[in-house]
Each structure stands twice: as C-alpha cells, then as structure tokens.
Image: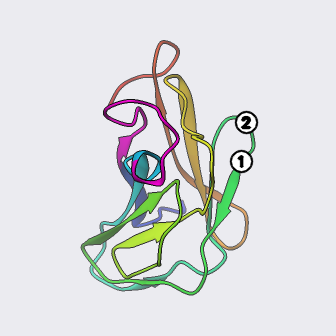
C-alpha cells in the first residue's frame, strides 16, 4: 500500500512557561514534520490540521531526506527548518490530534496525545 516517508515527529503542544499569548510563547508550541526517507520531498500543498479543523497549508518547501521542519504556531519568517502559522492563539490542546495530509488530501500520518490518545 501507500506509505509516505513524511511523518509527524515530536510535538510540543503545551508551550513551556506562562501561557501569555506572547509571540515567543506561541512559537514555543510546534509540531515537527520529518522526512524519514532518503529523497527530498516538496511539501507544497501538504496540510497539518488539529482536531478543531484549524489547518496550516505548506507553501513551496523542499524537505531534504532525513531532515525535519518545525511548524510553529506564532508569527515568524519561514526557513528551511522552521515555518510559522502566523496565528495569535494556541491551537494544540492538551488533548488533540495532529493530522498530516499530502497535496492530494490523503492522510499520511496522525498523532494523538492526551487522555484519549496514545502517547508515542
């Protein structure tokens, strides 16, 4: 069957420190998207969404083999290793599911945490 080399890696869902909605605090919340394969993948059109339907859509981003990118919640300038959702509110709850879909809308990985999910 279809198996993607692109997966959800680590998740920092509960921003360390005070939840003061500062940009620094918002950016301390992130989800890592990791390319486990040897070949680069263009993430253009891929989406990362939470259980409430908040969706981040990747722009043209070439993710090299065996590398990862962190998707931060707050505002910043996108680089090869860090991209920003440019939000002013936290989106990853203490109990949530991250879903990664490819550019055809096919779910390629999910990760759940909190009381209802399995912690990986």
Whether tag 2 and tag 1 are in contact, CB under 8 A, the answer is: yes
- Residue 22 part of the magenta segment: yes
Residue 12, given in percent of the width and then of the height, sits at 36, 41
SS for dot 1: loop
Check disc 1 and report the residue beneath it: 54
Check disc 2 and report the residue beneath it: 52
Q: Residue at x 38, y 30 (%)?
A: 18
Residue 120, given in percent of the width and then of the height, sits at 32, 32
Q: Residue at x 60, y 40 (%)?
A: 91
Closest to the observer, 97 or 83? 83
Q: Residues within 10 Å of mark 2 (few under 14, many from 20)?
A: few
Which of the 4 quarters of the picture holds residue 90? top right
Which of the 4 quarters of the picture holds residue 32? bottom left
Q: Which residues are magenta?
A: 10-24
Report the number of discs: 2
Main SS class of the magenta portion in the image = loop
- Residue 100 part of the magenta segment: no
* Side of 21 where 67 appears, left or right: left
Which quadrant: the N terminus? Answer: bottom right
SS for dot 2: loop
Cα–Cα gap, marks 2 and 1: 6 Å
Which of the 4 quarters of the picture holds residue 82? bottom left
* Side of 115 where 55 appears, left or right: right
Residue 92, above or below 115: below
């Amino acid at each position: 069957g279809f198996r993607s080399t692109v997966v959800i890696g680590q998740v920092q869902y509960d921003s360390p420190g005070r939840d003061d909605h500062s940009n620094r605090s918002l950016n301390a919340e992130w989800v890592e998207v990791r390319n486990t394969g040897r070949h680069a993948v263009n993430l253009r059109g891929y989406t990362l969404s939470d259980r409430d339907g908040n969706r981040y859509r990747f722009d043209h981003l070439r993710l090299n083999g065996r590398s990862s990118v962190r998707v931060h919640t707050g505002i910043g300038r996108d680089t090869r290793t860090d991209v920003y959702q440019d939000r002013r509110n936290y989106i990853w709850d203490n109990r949530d599911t991250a879903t990664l879909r490819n550019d055809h809308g096919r779910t390629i990985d999910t990760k759940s945490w909190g009381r209802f999910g399995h912690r990986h």
